[in-house]
Amino acid sequence: MYRFLLSRQWVCLTLLALALIPATVELGFWQFHRHEARVAHNNLIADSLAAPAVPVTELTGVGRQPADSVRFRTVTATGSYDTEHEVVVRQRTAADENSIGYFVLTPLVLKDGGGQEGSTVLVNRGWIEAGGDLTKFPEVPAAPEGQITVTGRMMADETTADSGIKDKPGLPPRQVMLINSEQQSEVLDKPVLGGYIQLTEFTPKAAGKQPQPVPEPDHDSIGAHMAYAVQWWLFTACAPTGWVILVRRERRDRAAAAKAGTAAESADGTETARTAAGAEGAEDRNHGQDAETDAETPAVGQGALGK
């Protein structure tokens, strides 16, 4: 009854169903792990933003990157801006996530040197419009002069591997693609603390327009990874279920076809028998008529002779 499962078509279909089961299970767990990572990342951001501010030198140092566990932590630093070595970071979006412009990256020479004389920390002062000529250094709002205290979020250096941003060579002067303390340390020829500060506020306040602050990172959205995981696991259940449905349907169709074939053969046999019986009846009737004709013929002949 199920011998059709040994056909080439059904063997291939069965192997495909068996391969889909572990594949969809694994894809479901892949999306589930992405969901867990997103939730953990959101919790890290929320905890860091809620934590009290600490001096930047507690979380990073020269030649040392801030740990992943302290990313987005609020830090403070006191010093004076080195505007002579200020650069802009290309192809960055504003808070509306549509406008393309620059981040303004200004070195802040620390007051106490961060434990090492002349130490500097990079400060992302915010976003500005790109302007018309991208080959020239744009017009940047002036940084506050004198000693200031900045407050912001602790960020790790950007790399191509982590950000996906290519570090293009041959850029116009004072323009970069990545915020990277090691690169800027080579330009400044000074010790630079690892990572950078994403500015949120500073004192004393400066007169005039300042770059647009970088918005707080999103830590509420969890994406659709959990829904995708459930979908993959539903596909896992669909594979054997669909296989069983197809097998039952194939068995039913084959049984119906066999039954219809038997009925057709029976009908053909009955019709053949009826035809044969009809032919025999006709032949008997013909024989009877011939006999009657033979009997009448002598009578007619004798009547003629009598006259």
Image: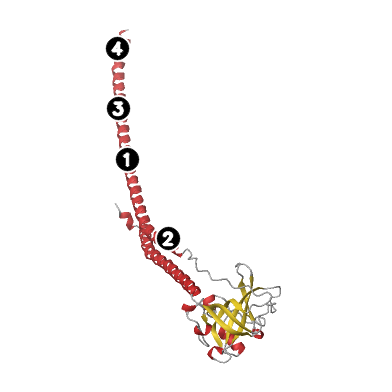
Q: Which-is-in-front pick, marks 1 and 3?
A: 1
Considering only vertical position in the picture, is 305 above or below 81? above
First in residue order: circle 4 vs circle 1: 1
Res 278 quadrant in image = top left
First in residue order: circle 3 vs circle 4: 3
Quarter of the picture holding the C terminus? top left
Q: Amino acid at mark 4?
A: Gln
Res 180 quadrant in image = bottom right
- Check disc 4: other Cα within 10 Å, few if <14, some if 14-19, many if 20+: few
Q: Which-is-in-front pick, marks 4 and 2?
A: 2
First in residue order: circle 1 vs circle 3: 1
Q: Is residue 112 left or right of residue 225?
A: right
- Check disc 2: other Cα within 10 Å, few if <14, some if 14-19, many if 20+: some
For mark 3, give the secondary structure: helix
For mark 4, give the secondary structure: helix
* Residue bearing mark 1: 263
Q: Amino acid at mark 2?
A: Gln
First in residue order: circle 4 vs circle 2: 2
* Residue bearing mark 2: 231
Label 1 to label 3, Cα distance in Å? 27 Å
Label 4 to label 1, Cα distance in Å? 60 Å
Q: Amino acid at mark 3?
A: Gly
Tag 2 near tag 3, CB within 8 Å:
no
For mark 2, give the secondary structure: helix
Label 4 to label 2, Cα distance in Å? 105 Å
In the image, 292 versus 300, the foreground residue is 292
* Residue bearing mark 4: 302
